[in-house]
């Protein structure tokens, strides 16, 4: 089974992807984690990406599409994959469709975790206290939400048109959200 997790920053994509990975032997593919690893390793890509991430902007589509293409071509996907944080633009969704076609793979479900903005801000500020992520501050969170509305909501609509979208209330407690996901798969 191949799944995409969509939703605003802080909706629980990473949290739920990790739970699904363990429960279903799926491979979590988190572009946010991959980029943070590049930053930690001090690669050229990481240095470029860091500027966009700490400003709450998206990293360029061609970089992200290339990164996912490399990961999918490597194989090693267990019983399938969970894409967490990708695609975030319609261009990325189109790129994904093309590369999956070449690899003879399909997306089975797109889970859209809907969460109100106030809750997003609250969760990310709480995470800032615990993890100290550079992009979890009030100003950058506002920017990330703006970018989400402009660039990622069209991706939600894109998958809705393809009848792949399943909307879930991501505003509930973590175990309630994962129970709903389990029921829906
Ligand atoms: P991401 O790492 O994807 O960051 P995110 O949207 O904040 O989601 P994340 O998965 O980390 O958080 P989660 O909702 O699980 O991206 C970071 C940056 O990388 C982007 O801004 C962008 O610059 C760049 N980037 C990544 N992918 C890209 C792409 N495809 N194209 C271009 N640029 C890209 O959880 C957040 C917090 O809420 C956690 O602390 C968690 O514990 C808590 N939480 C989760 N579920 C909860 C619940 N039900 N109740 C209470 N708290 C909950």
Image (cartoon, grey):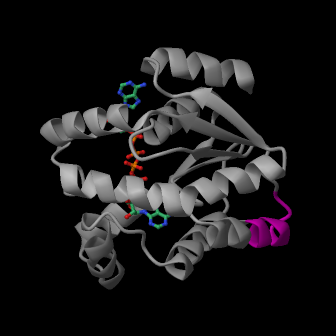
Q: Estimate the x, y position of residue 40 in percent, counting from the top left.
A: 24, 66
Q: Estimate the x, y position of residue 87 in percent, counting from the top left.
A: 60, 60
- Position of residue 167 in the picture relative to residue 38 (left or right): right
Note whether residue 69 is visible.
yes
- 37 vs 4: above or below: below
Question: Which quarter of the rendering shows the N terminus?
Answer: top right
Q: Estimate the x, y position of residue 110 in percent, counting from the top left.
A: 70, 43
Question: Which quarter of the rendering shows the C terminus?
Answer: top right
What secondary structure is the magenta-colored segment mainly?
A: helix
Note whether residue 137 is visible.
no
The question of residue 25 being in magenta is answered with no
Residue lying at 31% horizontally and 81% vertically, measured from the top left: 48
- Position of residue 142 in the picture relative to residue 104 (left or right): left
Give whichever of 145, 45 is nearer the camera: 145
- Position of residue 139 in the picture relative to residue 179 (left or right): left
Residue lying at 18% horizontally and 42% vertically, measured from the top left: 128
Residue lying at 54% horizontally and 76% vertically, measured from the top left: 61
The question of residue 102 being in magenta is answered with yes
Q: Which residues are magenta?
A: 97-105
- 47 vs 131: above or below: below
């Amino acid at each position: 089974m191949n799944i995409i997790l969509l939703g605003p920053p802080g909706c629980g994509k990473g949290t739920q992807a990790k739970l699904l990975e363990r429960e279903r032997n799926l491979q979590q593919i988190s572009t946010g984690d991959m980029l943070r690893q590049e930053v930690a390793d001090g690669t050229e890509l990481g240095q470029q990406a860091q500027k966009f991430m700490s400003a709450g902007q998206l990293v360029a589509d061609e970089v992200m599409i290339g990164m996912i293409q490399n990961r999918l071509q490597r194989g090693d996907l267990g019983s399938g994959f969970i894409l967490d944080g990708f695609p975030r633009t319609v261009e990325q969704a189109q790129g994904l469709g093309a590369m999956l076609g070449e690899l003879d793979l399909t997306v089975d479900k797109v889970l859209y975790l809907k969460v109100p903005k106030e809750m997003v801000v609250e969760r990310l500020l709480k995470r800032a206290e615990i993890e100290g992520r550079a992009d979890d501050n009030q100003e950058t969170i506002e920017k990330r939400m703006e970018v989400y509305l402009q660039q990622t909501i069209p991706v939600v609509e894109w998958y809705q048109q393809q009848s792949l979208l399943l909307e879930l209330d991501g505003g509930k407690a973590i175990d309630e959200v994962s129970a709903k996901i389990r029921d829906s798969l």
